[in-house]
Image (spheres, coloured by chain):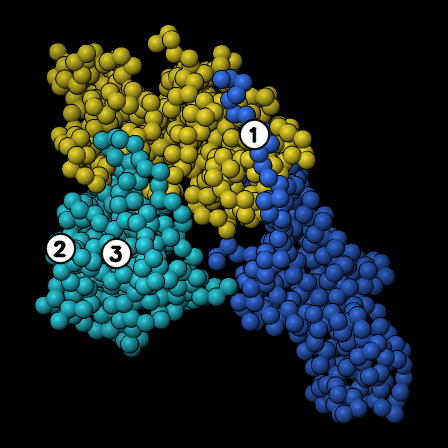
Amino acid sequence: MAEARGKIDITKIDESRLPKRDRIEHLQKIWYKFSLSKVSVVGLAIVILVVLAAIFYKFIVPYPEDVGAVVNFKAANQPPSMAHIMGTDPTGRDIFSRIIYAFRGALKMGIGCIAVVVPIGGILGLISGYWNGTWVSNLIMRLADVFLALPALILVMCVSSIMKPSLTNAMLALCVSWWPYYTRLVNNIVVSTRNEVYIRSAEVLGASNGHILFREILPNTLGPILTKMTLDMGWAIMAGATLSYVGMGEQPPTPSLGGMVSNGVGYLPDQWWLSVFPAFAIMLIVLGFNLTGDGIKDMLSDTE
Amino acid sequence: MTQENKNDFVVDVRNLHVSFRTFKGYTHVLNGVNLNVRKRERISIVGETGCGKTTTVYSIAQILAQNARIDSGEIYFNGRNVLTMPNKELKALRASGVSVIFQDPIASLNPVFTVGSQMKEVIRYSGVEGAGDKKVQEERTIAALKETHLPDPERIMNSYPFQLSGGMRQRICIAMSLSTPRDLVIADEPTTNLDVTIQDQVLKTLKQRVQEKESALILITHSLGVARQMADRIYVMYAGNMVETARSGDLFRRYCHPYTQGLMQCIPKLSGGGISEGIPGHLPNYMDPPPGCRFAPRCPYAVPECRQAQPPLYEIEPEHYVSCYRYRDQASGVMGEEV
Amino acid sequence: MAERNDILVVKGMKKYFPVQGSKDKFVRAIDGINFTLAQGETLGLVGESGSGKSTTAYNVIGMEEMTEGEVTFRGQDISMPLSKRPLALKKEIQIVFQDPGTSLNPQRTIYDILSLPLKIHKVCAPRDYVKYVAALMDLVELPYEYMYKYPATLGGGERQMVAIARALATAPSLIVLDEPTSALDVSVQAKIINTLLRLQKEMDLSYLFITHDLSLMRNMSDRVAIMYLGRIAEIAPTQSFFQNPQHPYTKMLLSSIPVVSEEEEQLKPTQIHSAGEIPSPVNVPTGCSFHTRCPFARDICREKDPEMVEFEAGHTVRCHFCQAGKGFVLGGES
């Protein structure tokens, strides 16, 4: 009896009857949930258009040479027309072309920051959340508090004024003050997931810390991270624009959205197109990311 | 029941079909529900998770989710069709005609306001005499709490929901929904989360309060035992249909529908004797429900006819209706085909 | 009781949780309980929420570290928490939780969930995982199509079957069932209970069944223990328990159960009605902890904690008025 107890016979299993993994339906369902809100579909469309425009700007913009230090006084300060749909600036460059090119800097800013901040902040959050209450976790969280207390933009300005102002330096400075947000987010999720019954079940089975951390807990943090990432893209682009507005981001002659707004402000209200169109571009891109982020949030919510 | 017209009923639901939009298409949940409640009558809808009992009562109170669609049918509340009611009347209906007690009192009470302020709010919008007067609100609140046997009403009024036990919270919900006169109280599994001794107390209170206030009651439950204890008449629901309805005593003496029989055999009895293997199979997929009787795929007695057309509700004794062809020969009438 | 082949012995188990903000106050979740569980037996641990029944289960399984007492499994001391238990022991004692919605990770497929114990305990070669998972699914009669589905797409009963299959994967000898059917419909419950009974026979399993449902225990367990405020109020073989309930609390519980037939109505004690609520385990009443709700309470009940009295063979009651052989006699304090 004792020998027979619990023996499970696998010889009778007919492997040909076992199903195969189907991932497509899962994706379809995710897309359905996202598409329930039409606004987030619009947001995603904006994001895709902006990204495509930034990648293929050479084929889209009417005056690719205008993105550099070009002077063409004959065409200076023209209001929007068929030739220059958003007008030209005081040195005769096509504003539409420059805006499209400036998307590159804006996206670089966003993606660059996210790429640095998410892994660092995320891993620290995982560690501090899993070993919640130990000195390691306390150290990480207090460190995060210290960095959170630094005002981001002021820090960026300090860094930029010490070093040479550039897109890279601005990004670096932003990252320093930004990772704690992800640490906190992931820490919160891990601390709450840690007490879930399914984690208890895995422990009762005897699963290792590594398994629990990376296979059971980590997948649960990906959704909220993705949502925050998308929303933060908008925020980072906004921060980038602010920095270039005060001259601490992308340096001329490379066009930047903030810089263009800043340059055009002096010409308001007569030559309104100089700053209104870049400002509108900033709004559009940030709006796009925020709407997409909302859609992702809905998509990942459990309500059927 | 044949002589009665719709004005005798607080609620009269006729042939109600409701579906929900989902990502794959429409789920046809309610499949021609007939239900009525007389004034001061207590009825119970018994069924398992997903059978549509909540959808039925939410349709009556008009608090269905956004993706719900009422395909056909009529719902009369005090003789007025709620489906064609203007919004203003609907609001009045919700504020003073129907009240709903939900399963989870912690979710239906706002955690950041005291119990007292929430109860006063209900009275304020109920439209009773002097509802705007703070003193009237206070008095009525205290009276309502006292009537539900809650000790120390003044202290409870100043407490926040989380400071009270589950049983007390559910009593507060009962007190709240009966603090002003109501024609109908809907209780959606009010004691599912409570311990059995507390459930007993809460159910007794609910029954007593509904009787005192002369309200009608629709009690949703998954427990035939609770229904037996509480209701004058019981509706057994399966997959969007009322499969059997009878006076409480009649139903437990003679349960007829194969589903009711299956359910009864699954219930663990205090007298022992083991429990059956359960009812084989699943609830049908509402996306593509089987034609005919929705229980046919799980029914041990199913004949080809069952798979073709939905059986009507045959009347086999006064007020005892069964939606099953096996009782056609014994039937004295069919619901909905009266003179 | 010498012939009993006890695999689990719990002696004087206590679990106190500190109350935040005050040093000398404790939540007395379990306050000294003793019971045994034989090979192939089902013991029903019944109580209201706050009675300490789940905490007892968690202490047996090692999810919490007990404050005092001793638990032995097949003669081996297992009073330590899970992290200190050897892997081989984890294989022997498994648990099925109440809500299969939370005990299965929503991000992992049924295959992932069922293959985890196989990986941890190296039950079979990796290439046989799929077959083994399929065999486990057969055991609980789940169709193979579910293998790569996520728990959210399954019904509650099916999810619980997955949880049961997971507990069986390591071929344990003791399974703690923490209200495994209380979140499910009766027709689903019937299926699960029958599956559990079948598996118990096939695999010679012992069940520690935590529940609040006495009617279910009537039909499922060999012995029943009633818990109240961290103590066992009455423990007896099922037959004796339902025929001759002794403790006033047991009677109160039985009288509160909604039943579906006259026959059952006859079995319900009539002289007692449910009243009051279970007090907070921080302020356990002095004397007999049930005296605040007991209609028969006398002065002695408020002052002196009753001893366990053996009323019949294997049927013990914690009440001042219960006498050996005679049962509940009021005024027995002379």
Which amino acid type corresponds to the residue marked 3 in the rendered image? Cys
Letter of the blue chain: A
Pointer 3: what residue?
B324
Res B274 → quadrant = top left
Q: Residue at x 42, y 14 (%)?
A: C6
Residue A136 at least partly seen: no
Task: Give residue A272's position: percent from left, percent from top.
Answer: 71, 86
The numbered disc on residue B317 is 2
- In the rendered structure, the answer to whether residue B73 lies left or right of residue C164 reads left
Q: Which is nearer the N-term, disc 3 or disc 2? A: 2
Q: Chain of mark 3?
A: B
Residue displayed at 13% across by 30% down: C271
Badge 3 and badge 2 in a common chain: yes
- Tint of chain C: yellow
Return the residue at label 1.
Answer: A9
Circle 1 SS class: loop
Tell me the kind of residue under disc 2: Glu
The x, y position of residue C164, in whole percent, is 48, 35
- What residue type is disc 1 on? Asp
